[in-house]
């Protein structure tokens, strides 16, 4: 071992030892976080907006969370229930959580199983409009076996019982504080909603709606050495560029969430040398959805984009495949996302365990696409550059939301499709309308009065069961459902529907993964119903002086804020 | 004049009711949903339940009447309760924001202070620099000072504030590091040090606003002053042998200020209404930022209440401008 390697080893040891050297609770001053969207409430049961859930996660904790790899880890309980430790019953119908003894709320009172039961009742109460109610679906009852044991019974065996009370969307709220806020009264409990008492590393000291949240270290936090920051703030408002700038260029903040900005600006801001971007990759996939039904305006309202009339152009899988082959996903990523994205061919791109090894879409093949269209009978007979079949030109309407990256993508894709003889008309819709789901509006993602639409979608937690079930035949939006539904494509495949049912009844993890992959492939590489483009990361900016941050795409980005510290 | 004012106020009531109905219908008919911002992973049935809990699925007339009742009966009752400790409100449902579930008037109360400090300071400074510039530009008509003043005013008026705001941030906050790039709303002024910080953080937004308003006001002052300097009474004053400062500042300026005062009075609602762009760029938690946030989130009660308050302010300050006119100009009399 020479002199240099000894030095390197020494510095490595010193680095590794840094967190241990740091000084204990409240020794590191103020943690300053900025969000481009301001926090509206600190009760995640009333708002599922990420800005609200994250801000609340500094204070409120679930029984268990998801770590940076998407694995469930214990927070307020002694261990994660499993079949082996008996926490999950052999028939998969109950899950039992054991609370850490001696756990206290930030007001000093004891945390008991009654609080957990209350939280369940609070969200399940009718008229409450609980934003997380779907996390409690399939639960028959939640009961306190004793002060430190909670037992959840499901109506039917549940392969993935880690839904309610797992992850930052369903944290435990204090029974004593929220007892009078059940059901319809929930909204009027402003005082409680704006300063919930929690078990987390911080407690709320001040809240200005849609502007600023102020915190201080929770004196009752279970680890006496944490958090190392004495106070914290989350300032909201402005936009992603300003937030990134305040971390990377002016250094006024330590951490900025959701700093999705274009690659040029990213490089420009990094040049100031004050911080860096961190990326968390979950399951958020930017994709094109293809409409398998006819969106033609000539059809009567109520018949347009319904299963009654198949799409005359896109019903042929060869046409759909050709559209996918013409796209250069790497070029799209370089222009739109840079380090914040990865070209991707799967609708279930992660966790690795569930992801299919499908990379066929990554190479652009214009010639192959042309050939495929010829085979399908689409030829340019009149020389105008657009293919026809039976006198019908291959013309598509392509809609998406108003967003600079999406408009760039639209223009590029239109160019590639023109190369293979497909004419594309572009349409841009306000995101509030597109995602608003108003059945009276013709421009919603659900109505899908277009051939192609681009958006991003992801699933909650790490289990894709519900997400894949969203594409079964019965979930197609149609007049009978008042245009509510998640199967925008009107995909109808009995085999897929059967697999969805089978997945819900399969408990062996390997078998589940195999089914999920099969379903993913049916939608993507085999069926070409959804054309995934980019796996989008959560891009956040972090100051060089902030330590302990572990980026997590499966839970709140502030999931381990208790471990954050100031680098000296 | 008092009867005139009263008559105008009474006439304003049906006008305002009509305005409130039109605003309500416009906001309601605008496409979008209060649930458009929530994550895509929330199932549609859950969205529907949340919309029902907000009451957003009720017919538009029901919601309008409920809003009228809340605005004109319940909210004043709570206001009086707040002042005198009575309990007129009696636990009735206040106007709640869909976004935060906080009472809309609490949010407005929380934000009015910031808006009035920042936007108000911008306006006052604009007046203080614009009037002298306008007067001198008119007095030295077509001089180099007038040319430069005109040039700056044109720039100030035509360059949008979202551009000047970001430009100032990049120059003075990012490159030079002299001022903070955002407004710290948690700062309370208790001593000289915090006062200095407050001045520092107000500097950039106030400069942007002052530049914009000063451009407008200085043009009005200049043209009105030019009109008056050519009048016979000014020549008479000079012929009497009065000194130039007396002619300009006493005789001409007083008369020139009449249209300027009207412009200023009509601009007052914006001090309460805030500036959407400046507040957004500098993260000032004022009324303008609240309005744009509410519009983006389709927070109908918030948008409706704020726009209606602006309508009331505009009607009131129009009246104030008319009354001031009568006071400043003896030729105008209201019987």
Image (cartoon, coloured by chain):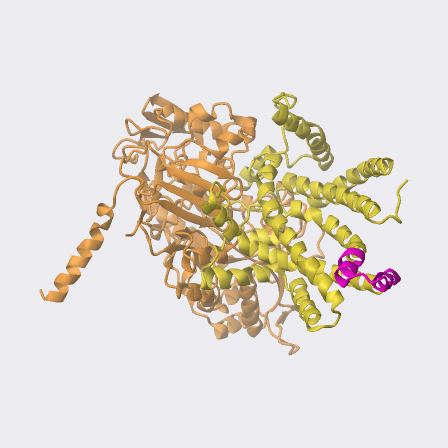
Q: Position of residue B1 (x, y in %)?
A: 86, 38
Q: Is residue A168 above or below residue B94?
A: below
In the displayed orientation, state which residue is furthest to the front: B241
Residue A278 seen anywhere in this rendered image of the structure: yes
Q: Position of residue B328 (x, y in %)?
A: 81, 48
Specify the quadrant that holds the C terminus of chain B: top right
Q: Does residue A404 appear to the left or right of B317 in the view shown?
A: left
Q: Position of residue A228 (x, y in %)?
A: 31, 42
In the picture, residue A556 is in which quadrant?
top left
Q: Tell me what hue chain B is rendered in.
A: yellow
In the displayed orientation, state which residue is furthest to the bottom: A383
Q: Is residue A71 above or below residue B248?
A: above
B213 and A411: which is toward the camera: B213
Q: Which residues are magenta?
A: B231-252
Q: Is residue B240 magenta?
A: yes
Q: Position of residue A505 (x, y in %)?
A: 40, 39
Q: Residue drawn 63% across and 23% down?
A: B84
Q: Which chain is orange?
A: A
């Amino acid at each position: 071992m020479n002199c240099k390697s000894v030095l390197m080893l020494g510095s490595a040891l010193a680095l590794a030892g840094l967190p241990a050297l740091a000084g204990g609770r409240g020794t590191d001053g103020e943690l300053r976080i900025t969000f481009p969207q301001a926090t509206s409430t600190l009760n995640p049961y009333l708002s599922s907006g990420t800005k609200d859930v994250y801000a609340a996660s500094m204070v409120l904790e679930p029984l268990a969370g998801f770590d940076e790899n998407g694995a469930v880890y214990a927070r307020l309980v002694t261990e994660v229930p499993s079949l082996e430790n008996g926490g999950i019953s052999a028939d998969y119908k109950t899950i039992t959580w054991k609370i850490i003894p001696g756990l206290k709320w930030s007001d000093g009172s004891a945390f008991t199983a009654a609080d957990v039961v209350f939280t369940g009742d609070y969200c399940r109460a009718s008229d409450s409009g609980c934003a997380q109610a779907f996390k409690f679906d399939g639960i028959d009852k939640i009961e306190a076996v004793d002060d430190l044991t909670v037992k959840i019974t499901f109506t039917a065996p549940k392969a993935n019982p880690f839904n309610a009370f797992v992850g930052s969307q369903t944290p435990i709220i204090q029974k004593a504080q929220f007892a009078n806020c059940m059901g319809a009264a929930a909204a009027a409990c402003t005082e409680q909603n704006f300063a919930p008492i929690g078990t987390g590393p911080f407690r709320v000291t001040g809240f200005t709606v849609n502007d600023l949240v102020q915190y201080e270290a929770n004196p009752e936090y279970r680890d006496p050495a944490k958090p190392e920051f004495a106070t914290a703030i989350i300032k909201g408002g402005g936009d992603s560029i300003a937030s990134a700038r305040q971390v990377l260029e002016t250094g006024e903040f330590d951490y900025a969430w959701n700093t999705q900005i274009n690659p040029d600006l990213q490089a420009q801001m990094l040049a100031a040398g004050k911080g860096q971007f961190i990326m968390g990759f979950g399951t958020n996939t930017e994709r094109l959805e293809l409409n398998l039904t006819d969106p033609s305006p000539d059809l009567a309202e109520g018949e347009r984009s319904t299963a009654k009339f198949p799409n005359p152009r896109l019903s042929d899988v060869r046409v759909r495949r050709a559209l996918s082959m013409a796209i250069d996903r790497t070029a799209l990523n370089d222009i739109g996302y840079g380090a914040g994205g990865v070209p991707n061919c799967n609708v279930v791109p992660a966790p690795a365990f569930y992801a299919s090894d499908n990379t066929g879409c990554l190479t652009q093949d214009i010639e192959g696409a042309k050939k495929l269209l010829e085979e399908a009978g689409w030829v340019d007979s009149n020389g105008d550059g657009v293919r026809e079949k039976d006198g019908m030109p291959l013309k598509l309407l392509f809609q998406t939301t108003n967003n600079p990256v999406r408009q760039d993508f639209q223009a590029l894709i239109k160019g590639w499709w023109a190369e293979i003889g497909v004419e594309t008309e572009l349409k841009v819709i306000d995101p509030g309308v597109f995602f608003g789901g108003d059945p009276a509006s013709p421009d919603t993602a659900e109505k899908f009065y277009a051939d192609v639409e681009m958006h991003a979608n992801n699933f909650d937690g790490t289990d894709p069961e519900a997400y894949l079930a969203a594409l079964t035949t019965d979930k197609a939006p149609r007049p009978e459902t008042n245009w509510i539904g998640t199967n925008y494509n009107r995909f109808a495949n009995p085999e897929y529907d059967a697999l969805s049912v089978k997945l819900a009844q399969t408990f062996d993890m390997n078998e589940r993964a195999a089914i999920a992959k099969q379903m993913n492939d049916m939608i993507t590489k085999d069926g070409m119903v959804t054309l995934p483009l980019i796996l989008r990361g959560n891009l956040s900016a972090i100051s060089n002086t902030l330590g302990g941050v572990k980026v997590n795409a499966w839970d709140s980005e502030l999931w381990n804020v208790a471990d954050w510290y100031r680098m000296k | 004049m008092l009867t005139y004012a009263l008559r105008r106020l009474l006439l304003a009531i049906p006008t305002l009711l009509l305005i409130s109905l039109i605003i309500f219908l416009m906001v309601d008919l605008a496409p979008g949903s209060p649930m458009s911002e929530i994550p895509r992973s929330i199932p549609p049935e859950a969205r529907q339940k949340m919309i029902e809990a907000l009451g957003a699925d009720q017919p538009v007339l029901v919601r309008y009447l409920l809003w009228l009742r809340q605005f004109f009966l319940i909210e004043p009752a709570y206001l009086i309760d707040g002042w005198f400790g009575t309990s007129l409100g009696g636990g009735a449902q206040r106007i709640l924001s869909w976004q935060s579930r906080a009472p809309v008037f609490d949010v407005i109360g929380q934000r009015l202070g910031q808006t009035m400090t920042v936007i108000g300071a911008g306006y006052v400074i604009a007046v203080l620099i614009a009037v002298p510039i306008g007067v001198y530009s008119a007095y030295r008509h077509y001089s180099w000072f007038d040319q430069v003043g005109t040039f700056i005013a044109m720039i100030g008026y035509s360059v949008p504030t979202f551009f000047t705001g970001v430009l100032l941030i990049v120059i003075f906050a990012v490159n030079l590091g002299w001022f903070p790039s955002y407004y710290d709303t948690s700062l309370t002024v208790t001593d000289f040090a915090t006062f200095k910080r407050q001045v520092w953080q107000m500097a950039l937004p106030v400069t942007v606003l002052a530049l914009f308003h000063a451009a407008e006001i200085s043009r009005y002052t200049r043209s009105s002053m030019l009109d008056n300097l050519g009048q016979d009474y000014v020549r008479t004053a000079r012929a009497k042998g009065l000194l130039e400062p007396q002619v300009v500042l006493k005789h001409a300026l007083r008369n020139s200020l009449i249209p300027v005062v009207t412009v200023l009075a009509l601009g007052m609602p914006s001090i309460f209404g805030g500036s959407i762009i400046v507040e957004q760029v500098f993260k000032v938690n004022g009324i303008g930022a609240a309005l744009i946030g509410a519009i983006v989130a389709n927070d109908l009660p918030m948008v409706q209440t704020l726009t209606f308050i602006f309508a009331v302010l505009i009607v009131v300050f129009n009246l104030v401008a008319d009354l001031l006119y009568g006071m400043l100009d003896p030729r105008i009399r209201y019987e």
